[in-house]
Amino acid sequence: MSLRLMLLGALGPLLALVLYFSGQELLRLKRNAEALEQVARIATEAEVLSDLVHELQKERGYSAGFTSSRGKNFAAELMAQRQATDAVLSGFFEAVPETEHAATATIATAREKLADLPELRGGIDRFALTVPELAATYTGLVNLLLTAGREMRDIARSPATGALMEAHEEIGLAKESAGLARAMGATGLGTDVFPPQVHRRFMDLTARETAFLARAAEVLHRPALLDELHGTPAAQALVPMVETISSLPYGGARGALTAPAWFAASTAWIDALRELETRLSRQTSALALTTAQKARSSLLITGALTLLAALAMTGLAVLIAEFVTRRLGRLTSVMMEFVEGRFEAWVPYIQSRGEIGQMAQSIYRFKQLSRAAIEKRAQDEAQLNARHQQVVDLVTEGLNALARADLTLRFDTPLAEEYDAIRNDFNTASARLAEVMRAVAGTVGEIEERSRGLRGSAVDLAERTTTQVETISRTAETVSGLTGSLAETNGALKDVKDLADEAKGRADRSGEVVRNAVAAMDRIAASSGRIAQITAVIEDISFQTNLLALNAGVEAARAGQAGKGFAVVAMEVQGLASRSANAALEIKELIEESAREVSGGVNLVGETGEALQAILEQILRVDAVLSNISATAEAQNRELQGVDSAMMRMRDLTSQNTEVADASRDASTELAEGAQRLSALVSEFDLRAPRGADSPKPGEASMAQGRAA
């Protein structure tokens, strides 16, 4: 994410917060305006509601006077009032949608009650209802309408119009009390004697009316409201009548006060209250409309100011972001030049204050430190290259000597501390390899000498065995020919059998000679084992040399371009170590093969010795027996037949011994050839006394003489 977006993102929450609170204020103003407009509509509906209540109150009064006088009073007035009530009622429900929405249940009940109004009027006309009954019905209907108006005003109260609406409600309650008092007065005055219970009800309603008016004056903060109302002509005409009615239970006289006169005065007073109620309703509506208009204006002004503030903050945020990012961009470009190694660029804003100036000063300091570090690195690289060159020269010279099979080279001049282990390891490996090769050379000489002797013995044995086979064959043929003519010599064969048993015993005694031959072959096998150990040492040296080459390759890789030549030398050392390991492996295989052949030769020599010894003894005894048998050939025919069979078996055994002797001769020859090859390989190494790195290197002729030796 770019710095510009980060700065804008940092200022974004502040702008969002401003927009949020501005939106909340706009929403509040909008709701306030809508509430005030609703108050204005409710005030208008309250006036319609009050008109119906007022007409019902008057109808209630006329009905009470009509009923109490049994039709003598207010007959015409009641009919006219009923028409006035019906005129107001005809469009009432269509004119109060807000009221019906706010007080659905109350308006529904009032609708049912108003639907029963014709039935109520019929009962009044028939004098089927008493004054309390009809008054209670009318009062219940009026109370339903007043309750609906109160519920309607409760959902749309506003601080601006709350006092007017409450005062309007109190005036309506006072007017209801005045209407009930009018009915009670007309009822009492319509009879000969003012009933006590009607009088008590009249006094209670008058007191309630006064209390409601006082509450309205208090809500409106107009203490003089009662005085203003009492100063009206209607109040001045009504007050003496109220005092006259109030004194009736205490001995007062009616005088000229009649029910029509009281009703007319009460109606005038109620009209005055109605006028005040209407005036308050209109004031409420006008104030609500005025306040709503102001709220709408405030809404527009606040919205415009909010939009301007948002635009201004957005512009300021963009300017700040551009101001900061451009300066940081210039500093960043300077830093990129420093990173690329160009330290000639000038660092801007270095004299500025604040974070930008501090950043510029830090960049300038970085520039100075980078220059010093580059110079220091160049010096360190020069020293390191010199040390590396010493190591490369040492390894190069040492590997050249190894390539020439020269194991006499030693390095005495110490290298740097961290590289001197290479010199020590090379000297140690070279000395160890020379020691091993000298031991191998001595062992190879012994093997070669013994293999030559073994080969000569095997050849001699093979020749003698061949001669013996031929002699035994001729003897067998002779004995076979004599068998046919000397049948009488069969008796002598028992002596031949006894002699054969004796020859077996002598063959056991001749095993000592064969065991000595086997011991000689075991010593040859032991020498082969020593050669195998020496070969293992050569393999270990090859592994150490390979590891040394690997370490040299790692150091060459660390040296980078300067270590390329060192890496080539390390590869050559590794190749030489691999060839040494292969040669050691070949020697090991040849020695193992020679060991197997020697082991086989031991067995064959043992068997050959036994067979030859037995044959030798048997031939001697057979010769003696044949000398004796020659005198009595005809008597020993049966014995000669047994001798013939024995000679045939001896011929077969001798043939087998011939094959074994030939195999032993071949194995001895191969062992001698392997020893010669191993000797030729060892002779390639220069095993003279060690010399220093500064000693003159031997020439090609010297190397040839060393290999020949």
Image (cartoon, rainbow, N blue to C red):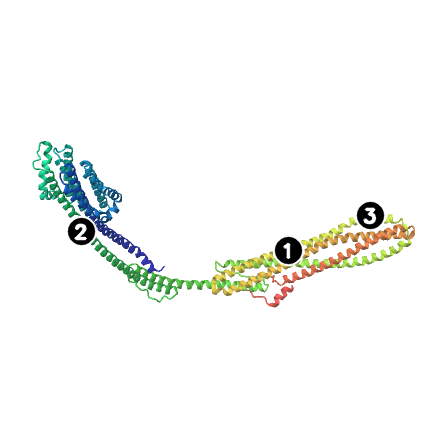
Q: Residue furthest left?
A: 255
What element does badge 1 sit on?
helix
Above or below — where is 627 with respect to 197? below
Any mark on residue 183, and which?
none
Residue of label 1: 532
Residue of label 3: 501
What element does badge 2 sit on?
helix
What element does badge 3 sit on?
helix
Q: Earlier in the sequence, mark 2 or mark 1?
A: 2
How far from the left and from the top, in percent, is residue 104? Answer: 26, 45
**Left/right of residue 361 with respect to residue 531 in the rendered view:** left
Task: Indicate the quadrant containing the C terminus: top left, top right, bottom left or bottom right.
Answer: bottom right
Give the amino acid at mark 2.
Answer: Ala
**Left/right of residue 273 with respect to residue 488 in the rendered view:** left
Quadrant housing residue 539? bottom right
| Along the line of sight, the residue nearer the viewer: 228 or 202 | 202
For disc 3, the neighbor class at 10 Å (few under 14, some 14 to 19, many from 20) is few
Q: Earlier in the sequence, mark 3 or mark 1?
A: 3
Residue of label 2: 286
Question: Gap between marks 3 and 1, in whole Å?
Answer: 46 Å
Question: Gap between marks 2 and 1, in whole Å?
Answer: 125 Å
